[in-house]
Image (cartoon, coloured by chain):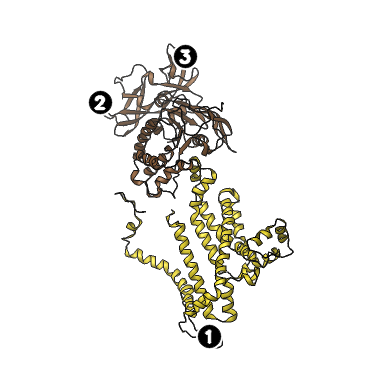
Amino acid sequence: MSQLHESTTTDRPASGSRDLRLSGLTKEYAAFTAVKSLDLVMPQGSFFALLGPSGCGKTTTLRMVAGLETPTSGAIHLGDTEITYAKPYKRPVNTVFQNYALFPHLNISKNVAFGLERRGVKNVGQQVADMLELVELTSQAHKKPAQMSGGQQQRVALARALINQPEVLLLDEPLGALDLKLRRGMQLELKRIQTEVGLTFVHVTHDQEEAMTMADTIAVMNQGVIEQMGAPNDLYENPKTTFVANFLGQSNLIEAEIQGREGGQVKVRVQGALASIPTERAHSESGKGWLGIRPEKVLIAEAGHPIDAPGDVITGGFITDVSFVGVSTQYMVKMPWGQELMVFEQNTGARRMLPVGTKVDVSWRPEYAFLLDASQDAKAGIEED
Amino acid sequence: MTSTAGIAPANPHDSAAPAPRGRKLTGYWLILPAALWLGVFFVIPFYSLVSSSLFDPNGSVLTGYNMTWHFANYVDAINDYKGQLWRSIWYAGLATLACLVIGYVLAYAIAFKAGRWKNLMLVLVIAPFFTSFLLRTLSWKLILADDGWVVGFAQTIHLTNLLNFIGLTGTDDRLLATPFAVIAGLTYNFLPFMVLPLYASLEKIDVRLIEASSDLYASPMRGFFKVTFPLSLPGVVAGTLLTFIPAAGDYINATLLGNTNTKMVGNVIQSLFTTQGDYAAAGALSVTLMAIIVGLVLIYVRTSGTEDLV
C-alpha cells in the first residue's frame, strides 16, 4: 500500500509490476449482491476475459475498475497504486463501451482526440492520424459517428480509448452489436492490436467462442463469483463445475457412482458399465458424481462394430436425431437409461452418415472424461446461449 | 458535410427522389389542414396588418382610412418609438437570459436528478398555466409591494443597491414599478417555455456519453461543457426562441409591473391600436417589430449551428 509509486497516468514501467489486482471486491445493491468478494489478478499485458451470462456481475466488475461504480467493499490496485475510490477521470484506464458511446456532436478525429485534449496535450493531430491509421479509418476523419457503420464505429471507439495509452483497456461486450461475420473479423483485429500495443485488455463478454478466440486467460463468472479461471483450452478440457462444463461449449453429464482411486485413475460405475477418469480431472472423490464428456470426444459405431477407444464402451443406444452441419454431423443418441447423449462426428468421409433409429454403441477415451460433484445442478449454465 | 471518399454514405436526398405519385399527393393532403389554418389565421391577418401599415396617417376611426402606400409610416414609427423598440429587445433579452440560467438548472435537475419525482416536477412546471396569465402577473404586484417582505429582504442583503447600480431600479429602494419588476415578470411568465424544451433535449442525452467523457479524463465540469451542453443546444435554441419572441412583444408585464419609463413596444402598439386609433403607425410598428425579431432569430439560429446537431 505504499504511496511511493503514485501513478502519473501515463508513465508505465516496462516490467510486470502493473498488474491489475482485485481483492475482496464486492458490490451490493438494495436487492441483491452483484459481485461477491472477488479476488483476481490480471497480469500486465495480458488479454483477460470475464465470461458469463447476463447478470453474472461481469459488467459491474468492469465498471468498478473503470470507476463508474463504487465498490461496497474490497480494493482495486494497479501495481502498487490503489485506485478503488479514484475518480474515473483520474484513472489510467479507458473503456470501449458496449454501444460505443461516441460523441454524436463531434467528428471522428475530435472523438479520438477527446481524451488527449482533456489532459491538456497540445498538437494531438499527428497522434490522432496515427491512431486512425491503426484502425484503418484515415479517410473517415471528418465524418460524424452517425454517418458510419457499426463496425467503423466500433473501431472509432477502440481508437478513442487506445490513443490515451491506458494501462488497462476495458472492453464491455464491444462486438455484441455486430453481425457474426464482422464480429469474427473484429475479434482477430482486436487480438492483433492487443499484441501490437501490449496493453492489458480486460474483455467482458457472454460469448464463449469470442472469449476463447481472443483471451489468454478466461475467468468464468456466475452469480457474482468466479466459477473457474484459466487458459481457454484448460477450461474447456477440464471444467471444474457443471456451470463451466455447460456454459463453455457443451457437455454430456452422466450420473456415476464413484468406486474409488486406482493408480492415477478414479474408477466409476456408469449405469452398469465401468469407466475411469484421470485423478487430475476428477473434482469429486466419493459418493455420486457427474461423469462429463464433450460431444466431439464421444465416438459411435453401429452395434457390434469395433470402436476405436480403449476402455469405456457403453452399449445399447439408438440414434434419435441427426443433423448435418457441413464440417460435422451431430447425433442424439438415446441410452438404455433414457438419457440422450450428444455426439459430434467430424465428416471425414470414413463412414456414411448413420440414419435415425440405428442401434449404436458409444465410447470415449478415459483421458478426455472429467468428473464433477453430483450436488451441482447438471443443467447449470445450459439455457444461456 | 459531404464525403470526400469514394464510398458516399447514404444520402437522404437520393432515397427521396423517386417517390410514387400517390405518396406525393398524400403529403399534400396531410399539409392541407395546417395550410388552411395558417391561411385564415396568419396570411390574411398579416396581409391586413401590412396594408394598414401603409394607410394615410391622417385617417381616424371617424374619417375612415385610405390606402395611400405611405411608406413614410415606417420611418416615422421607428423614429418616434426607437426607444421602446430597443427597450423591448433589451428587456426580452435579459428575461430570456434569466430564464435560460434558471430553466437550465431546473431542467437539468428534473432530467438527471429527480428520479421518481420527475413527472411530479414536470406537472409543477406547467401548473401555473392553470391560472390566468393576468392574475399571475397581478399577484407579482403583491409580491413586490413596497411594504412586502421581498423588498425588505432585498434591502437587507443589499440587492436593491446592486439593482440600482446596474440600472434596473431607482434610488428609492422600490422593486415594483421598475425595469427589474418588468423583467422579473417576463422571466416568471415565460419560464415554462424555456424549461420544457430544455428538459426534452437533456432527457434525450444518453448518460453513457457522460460516463464516456468521464472515462476520457473529463472532470464533471468539463464533461458538462464539452458533452452535455453541446448536446442540449437544440433545447437551448428552442427555449430561448419560445421565450424571447413572446417576451419582446409582451405588454401586460410592463403595464402591471412597470412605470411610464418602462413602456415596451407592445404597450405602444396596444395604445396606438385601441385608444388612439392610429392604425397606420400601429401597423408599421408591428411589422417593424416582426422584422427585427425574424432577423435576430435567423442570425441566432445560424450562429448557434444547431443544424449540425444530430
Give the image location of residue A320, x and y in percent: 35, 31
Residue A275 against residue A20 in the figure, above or below: above
**Label 3, on which residue?**
A260
Q: Are marks 1 and 2 on the same chain?
A: no
| Circle 1 residues within 10 Å: few <14, some 14–19, many ≥20 | some
In this rendering, position of residue B135 left or right of residue A95: right
Residue A100 in view (yes/no):
no
Whether pointer 2 and pointer 3 mark residues with C-beta atoms closer than 8 Å, the reply is no
**Label 2, on which residue?**
A350
Chain whose colour in the figure is brown: A
* Whole-number angstrom distance, CA of label 2 to CA of label 3: 38 Å
Whether pointer 1 and pointer 2 mark residues with C-beta atoms closer than 8 Å, the reply is no
Give the image location of residue A272, x and y in percent: 42, 19
Disc 3 marks a residue whose amino acid type is Gly
Q: Secondary structure at mark 1?
A: loop
The answer to which quarter of the image holds residue A292 is top left
In this rendering, position of residue A222 left or right of residue A73: left
* Whole-number angstrom distance, CA of label 1 to CA of label 2: 110 Å
Q: Are marks 1 and 3 on the same chain?
A: no
Q: Secondary structure at mark 2?
A: loop
Residue at figure coordinates x 57%, y 78% from the top left: B272
Chain whose colour in the figure is yellow: B
In this rendering, position of residue A369 left or right of residue A33: left
**Label 1, on which residue?**
B59
Tell which subunit mark 1 falls on.
Answer: B
Whether pointer 1 and pointer 3 mark residues with C-beta atoms closer than 8 Å, the reply is no
